[in-house]
Amino acid sequence: MKHTATRALDGLRRLAGMATTLLVTSFLVFSSLYLAPGDPASFLVRGRSASPRELAEIRHQYGFDQPFLVRYGHWLDQVLHGDFGRSYVFHQDVSSVIWSRLPATLLLVGVSALLIAVVGIAAGMVGALRRGTRTDSALVLLVTVGAAAPAFVVAVLLRSQFGVRLGWFPTIGNGTGVLDRLHHVVLPAVALSVTFMALVTRVTRSAMLEELGREHVEVSVSRGTPRWTVIRCHVLRNALGPIVTVSALLISGMLVSTSIVETAFGMSGVGSLLVQSVNQMDFQVVQAIVLLVVAAFVVVNALVDVAHPLIDPRVAAAGSAR
């Protein structure tokens, strides 16, 4: 009974923390409109000369003449009802503009996440199981280079080598149809995931090495238990906690990096839309994308907190002991 009450209290605390984080983020995101240099009404005329009367009418039309907190409360109420306002550039609802770009970004993030999970964890396991060998040394070198390589540099190298020189993959656009879209997303997904794959490889290797040094693992090996059974049941299972936690947080953070990769490969996604909206000062779209990215990160973080005790029973046991 006490344990159930404690879990319920922890759940309420998580929800309160999520709500507070999103509320503070929404305030900061909305404030960015006023932190930007210049008059928002002047941005809307797009460089045309406008009389003071026209500027006053624009401020009144968009509510710029209202007090800051009044505007923020009105905007927050709209957001809570799924209305992010109207784009100044596209003259459409912000939700419609983002929704039309979302499939390309989700495909890019999905393929990248698959690469990170499969290649990163597999490479980390190889490095841990072959510690001290040339394979491990080469892997450590590749991980160091990959973790330090900026996404735009990797994108340029991939485009020049595999797109332009060899012609194996297209270098621009989203493609049409399922297979063509997958063909177009290969290079962007690799460019997006290289740094994250290196980080997951490093975390997997460290976690596996830590578990390999545990006393119960050495006892199992000394008793003649097959090596792969020990690795699967005692090493990998216990190492999954930090691996899954770091992988999930990195994958949620990829949403920010998509802006660089999508722009480099000319993809029409949410990331390139963010860059375009910043350049064109389309504040409504910028505010919506930033808020959605933060919301995705908060939700993934909460899901990781919930899943961690299920993956690693030792965490749940430690929580019960308290």
Image: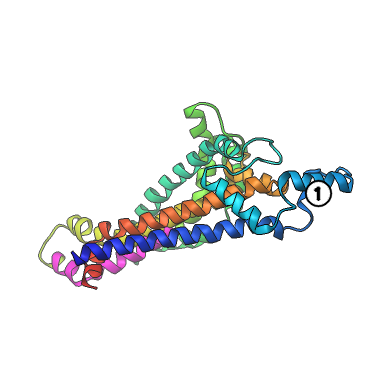
Q: Which residue is mark 1?
A: 42
Image spot of residue 255 (x, y percent) = 52, 50
Stretch of the chain drawn in magenta = 199-220
Give the quadrant of the C terminus: bottom left
Image spot of residue 208 (x, y percent) = 30, 63
Image spot of residue 31 (x, y percent) = 65, 58
Residue at disc 1, secondary structure = helix
Residue found farthest to the left: 223
Q: Which residue is more in the foreground, 218 or 108?
A: 108
- Residue 217 among those drawn in magenta: yes
Image spot of residue 16 (x, y percent) = 42, 61
Q: Which residue is more in the foreground, 281 or 105?
A: 281
Q: Is residue 217 above or below residue 58?
A: below
Give the quadrant of the N terminus: bottom left
| Quarter of image, res 315 | bottom left
Residue occupying the point 69% across, 55% down: 33
Residue occupying the point 19% across, 72% down: 215
Q: Is residue 178 visible?
A: yes
| 189 lies left or right of 33 | left
| 107 lies left or right of 274 | left
| Quarter of image, res 73 | bottom right
Residue occupying the point 50% across, 57% down: 22
Three-letter amino acid code of the residue under disc 1:
Ser
- Residue 155 among those drawn in magenta: no
Answer few, some or many: residues within 10 Å of disc 1's Cα (few below 14, many 20 plus, some between 14 and 19). Answer: some
